[in-house]
C-alpha cells in the first residue's frame, strides 16, 4: 500500500503541523531505536497496556492515531483485532510502518496519511481508538479528542499514552535533567538531528497533567475516565469510554 500525498486544508495550523511533520520525517529512520534506548525498552509494555485498555470485548475495527512507525497498530493486530488502521501525517514514519507491515506480512493492518485533527472517517465507525505520545505534538488536543469521540461507536474505548509531569519534585528534577541534557545528545548522535531532540523537553513542559487529560476527555463526552501512571509516574495512560 502506497502512502498517499497529503494535502493540508484545515485542521492543524500550518506552522506547528509543518514543523512537527518535518521533524518526524527527519528522525523516522531511527525513531524505534531511540524509543528503546530512551525508555530502556519500557515503552513496549506501556503500549501493550494501552492496547488492552482500547480493546473491549470483541473489538474488530480499531484506529491508531498518530501511529508513527505503527507500534500500537501492530499490537492491536497481535491482540486479535481483525481490522486495524493507523494514520499519521509524517510520510517517513508511515514508510517505516509500511515496511514493518510487509516484512511481517500483516495484510490487515492498513496505514494512511491523515490529520489527527480532521479524521477522514465517518461517525460511529471504530470500536477502539488508541494514540501514543501524540498529545505533545498535535496542535489542539481538544480538537483531536472531539474527532476521536465522533469516529467511535457508542461504547467504544479510547486510550491515550503520553508523558506526564511527576508529583515528586525530586524525581521530576531528575527526569528533567535526563530529558534536557542526555536525551538531546543521544538523539542528536543517533539520528543526526539534534534539534528534534531539543524539542522533546520543550514539548514535555507543555503537556497537560494526566488528570487534566482525563478532564479534556470528559469535556468532549467520554465517560468512565481511568488514569494509570506508568514509568515511575513519568507516563500516563488515560482511558475513556463513549
Ligand atoms: C512521538 S510520535 C508517536 C508515534 C507512535 N504513536 C508511538 O507511540 O511510537 C508522534 C507522532 O504524531 C504524529 N503527528 C503529530 N501531529 C499529527 C497530526 N496532526 N496528524 C497526524 N499525525 C500527527 C507525528 O508525525 C509522529 O509520528
Image (tube, rainbow, N blue to C red):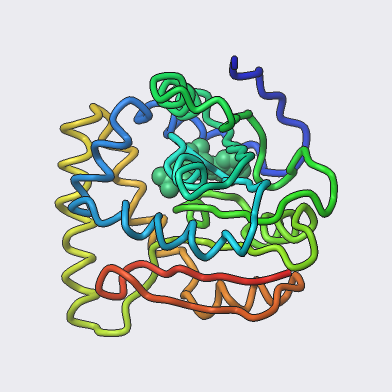
Residue 17 x, y percent position in the rendering: 58, 39
In this view, the residue farthest toward the right is 123
Quadrant housing residue 55:
bottom right
Q: Which residue is pictured at 16% across the width and 70% down the height?
A: 174
Residue 185 x, y percent position in the rendering: 16, 42
In the rendered image, the vertical position of residue 103 relative to residue 21, given as above or below? above
In the rendered image, the vertical position of residue 240 relative to residue 38, given as above or below? below
In this view, the residue farthest toward the bottom is 168
Q: Which residue is pictured at 46% across the width and 37% down the height?
A: 70
Number of marks drawn:
0
Residue 15 is at least partly visible in this image: no
Identify the image quadrant of the C terminus: bottom right
Residues 42 and 108: in front is 108
In this view, the residue farthest toward the top is 2
Q: Which residue is pictured at 79% across the width and 41% down the height?
A: 121
Residue 6 x, y percent position in the rendering: 67, 24
Left or right position of 127 against 90: right
Amino acid at each position: 500500500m502506497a502512502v498517499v500525498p497529503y494535502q493540508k486544508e484545515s485542521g492543524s495550523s500550518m506552522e506547528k503541523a509543518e514543523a512537527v511533520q518535518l521533524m518526524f520525517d527527519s528522525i523516522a529512520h531511527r525513531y524505534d531505536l531511540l524509543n528503546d534506548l530512551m525508555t530502556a525498552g519500557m515503552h513496549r509494555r506501556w503500549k501493550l497496556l494501552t492496547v488492552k485498555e482500547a480493546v473491549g470485548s470483541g473489538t474488530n475495527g480499531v484506529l491508531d492515531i498518530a501511529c508513527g512507525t505503527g507500534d500500537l497498530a501492530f499490537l492491536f493486530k497481535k491482540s486479535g483485532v481483525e481490522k486495524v488502521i493507523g494514520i499519521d501525517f509524517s510520510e517517513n514514519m508511515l514508510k517505516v510502518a509500511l515496511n514493518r507491515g510487509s516484512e511481517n506480512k500483516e495484510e490487515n493492518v492498513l496505514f494512511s496519511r491523515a490529520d489527527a485533527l480532521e479524521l477522514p472517517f465517518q461517525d460511529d465507525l471504530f470500536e477502539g481508538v488508541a494514540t501514543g505520545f501524540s498529545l505533545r505534538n498535535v496542535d489542539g488536543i481538544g480538537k483531536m479528542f472531539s474527532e476521536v469521540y465522533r469516529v467511535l461507536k457508542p461504547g467504544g474505548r479510547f486510550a491515550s499514552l503520553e508523558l506526564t509531569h511527576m508529583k515528586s519534585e525530586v524525581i521530576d528534577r531528575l527526569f528533567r535533567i535526563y530529558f534536557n541534557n542526555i536525551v538531546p545528545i543521544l538523539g542528536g548522535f543517533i539520528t543526526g538531528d539534534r534539534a528534534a531532540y531539543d524539542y522533546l523537553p520543550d514539548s514535555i513542559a507543555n503537556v497537560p497533567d494526566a488528570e487534566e487529560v482525563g478532564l479534556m476527555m470528559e469535556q468532549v463526552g467520554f465517560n468512565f475516565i481511568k488514569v494509570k501512571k506508568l514509568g515511575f509516574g513519568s507516563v500516563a495512560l488515560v482511558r475513556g469510554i463513549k
